Image (cartoon, rainbow, N blue to C red):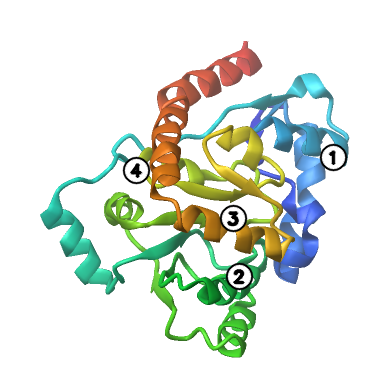
Amino acid sequence: QTPFVITIHDASLFIYSHCHPRTRLLSIRLALPFVARRAAAVITVSEHARQDLIRILGLPPEKVHVVYAAAPEHFAPVCDAHDLASVRRKYGLPAQFLLYVGTLEPRKNLRRLVRAMRQIRQYGLPHKLVLVGATGWQIEELYREIEAQEMKDDVLFTGYVPDEDLPALFSLATLFVFPSLYEGFGLPPIEAMACGAPVLSSNRSSLPEVCGDAAYLVNPEDEEELVDALVALLSDGARRAEMTARGLKRAGTFSWRRAARETASIYRSVVQ
């Protein structure tokens, strides 16, 4: 039997099965434990995900290795006024906005974010919400929530955005928000940090491990805590500037070059 290595990004199929379509559960979830146990090594993207996989799939700890992801090398703050204005026009972006980037699906907790956005209106905050990413399953529930909260004029969907436009989007955002319930790594917050956006993130799963002290972390299931955090950060430019500095430093600690070296080392250990 030829030895092989498998990369598993998270255990959400098992922990948040209700947040995945049935077809995905029937195909990948059924096969994954068998394949993972047969693999000579398993790579995952955070220590949190590693512990989940060891526990849920019953894998030997010495077989599961962490290789952290990173933002693309070209992700950096965009300062050119012409480039920023061009991207603002292209997507019809408002003057001040909160940004989310990622698949639009239930696990990302966007309905609760929409409700929190409705509540910050009473504080006189004018910020809109810009949702960037492909539509996942159960998107109709998010649309219904926006309608119920009377937020149709305050939530902008861009759809999928090419990589070359993302640094400018992050750079234009007043605040990047990522209230996800579960992530194996959670790349968008690190991408946002690399581009200078202050980050408000969930305190669940791998996100505290990945974000460190560079993000403002909240309980994603506590709507009032989310509202309080939004009001605090949107009302305090100096605090956001401090978070930008910490975020740039934090994003710099992750590297695809290092990830490639570590991955190659794991493969070499398997074939020797």
Say if mark 1 contacts mark 2, CB within 8 Å: no
**How far apart, in angstroms, are the residues tagged by discs 3 and 1?**
36 Å
Sequence-first tag of 1 and 2: 1
Crowd band around label 1 with a 10 angstrom C-alpha radius: few (<14), some (14–19), many (20+): some
**Which residue matches tag 1?**
57
Sequence-first tag of 3 and 1: 1
* Element type at mark 1: helix
Q: Is residue 244 visible?
A: yes
Crowd band around label 4 with a 10 angstrom C-alpha radius: few (<14), some (14–19), many (20+): many
* Element type at mark 4: loop
**x and y percentages locating residue 231 in the rendered image:** 54, 60
Q: Is residue 272 left or right of residue 86?
A: right
Q: Which amino acid lies under the numbered mark 1 shown in the image of this protein?
A: Leu
Q: Quadrant of the N terminus?
A: top right
Q: Residue at x 81, y 42 (%)?
A: 34
Q: Quadrant of residue 57?
A: top right
Sequence-first tag of 4 and 3: 4
**Which residue matches tag 2?**
116
Q: Which amino acid lies under the numbered mark 3 shown in the image of this protein?
A: Ala
Crowd band around label 3 with a 10 angstrom C-alpha radius: few (<14), some (14–19), many (20+): some
Which of discs 4 and 1 lies nearer the camera? The answer is 4
Vertical side of 65 occupied by 170: above or below: below
Considering every residue shown, the one lying at the far top of the view is 272
**Which residue matches tag 4?**
195
